[in-house]
Image: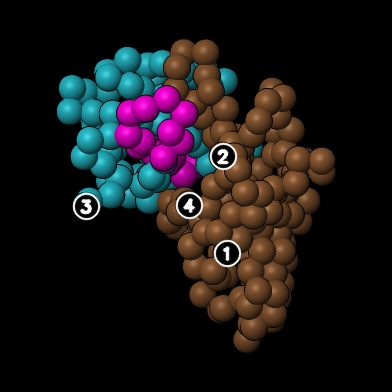
Chain colours: A brown, B cyan
Amino acid sequence: AQSVTQPDIHITVSEGASLELRCNYSYGATPYLFWYVQSPGQGLQLLLKYFSGDTLVQGIKGFEAEFKRSQSSFNLRKPSVHWSDAAEYFCAVGAPLTGGGNKLTFGTGTQLKVEL
Amino acid sequence: KAGVTQTPRYLIKTRGQQVTLSCSPISGHRSVSWYQQTPGQGLQFLFEYFSETQRNKGNFPGRFSGRQFSNSRSEMNVSTLELGDSALYLCASSPPGGTNYGYTFGSGTRLTVV
C-alpha cells in the first residue's frame, strides 16, 4: 500500500527566506504526486502535481517541487516566503483503485509559520 | 465557474444521532470523493462515487454511508454518531477520465459530536 511521510510537523521561517518542505513516499509503481495547501477552516487547494516527465514541477503562488525517484522524495520549495504562505501543507500520492477511479493518500501535513 | 459546495459548513450533533452532509460538485464533474480529516488520523479516504455508484470505500465502519444522485450531487450519512466522528469532512469532485486526478476540494463540513 502507498504511504507518505512528512517528517516536519512544524516549520517556522522568516518572511523573505527560502522554504523547503520535505515529503517521502512509498509506492510500488510510478507515482502520481501532489502538494496541497490548507488555510484554517478551509479545504485543500492544489499547488502542483507530478505525473511524469520533467522532474522539476512548477506550481501556483511561486511554488515548485522536485521529484527524485532514487530518494523517493517530492520536496516542495519556494525561494522567498510571504506572510500569506502561512498554512498547512500536505503531500499526497495518488493511486488507482480496483473499482475504478482513484484515491489520494496524504501525509500528516507540515504547519508553516511565517515570522515577519 | 462555481466550485465544490459543501453544506452545511458547521454542525453540532449529539452522540447517537445521525447526520447527513451534502456536496455539490463542479458542473460536469461526475466523480465525487469524500475524505475525513481529524487531528489524530489526518486525511483519510472515505468513499468515491461515480455515476450514482459507489466504486470504492475506505476502511470505515458501516455507519458511514453515502449516495450520489443523477445530477452528481452526493450526500454522506453517519449514523449512531460517536465522539470520534468529530472531524472536518471534505468532498472533492473530478471530471471523468481515467487517472485524471483533477480533484477540486470543497471547504468542508465541520462536524462536532458532543
Name the chain letter of the residue that bears numbered label 2: A
Q: Magenta stretch: give its range.
A: B79-102
Q: CA distance from mark 2 to mark 1?
A: 17 Å
Q: Which residue is mark 2?
A: A51
Q: Which residue is mark 1?
A: A63
* Residue B5 magenta: no
At 28% across and 29% down in the image, what residue appears?
Answer: B30
At 65% across and 74% down in the image, what residue appears?
Answer: A79
Q: Nearer the viewer, mark 3 or mark 2?
A: 2
Name the chain letter of the residue that bears numbered label 4: A
Q: Position of residue B13 (x, y in %)?
A: 38, 38
Q: Position of residue B12 (x, y in %)?
A: 38, 44
Considering only order in the chain, which callout, 1 or 2, is on the residue closer to the N terminus?
2
Q: Are marks 4 and 1 in contact (CB under 8 Å)?
A: no
Label drawn at residue A47: none
- Secondary structure beneath dot 2 equals loop
Position of residue A10 in the picture relative to residue A92 (left or right): right
Q: Are marks 2 and 1 in contact (CB under 8 Å)?
A: no
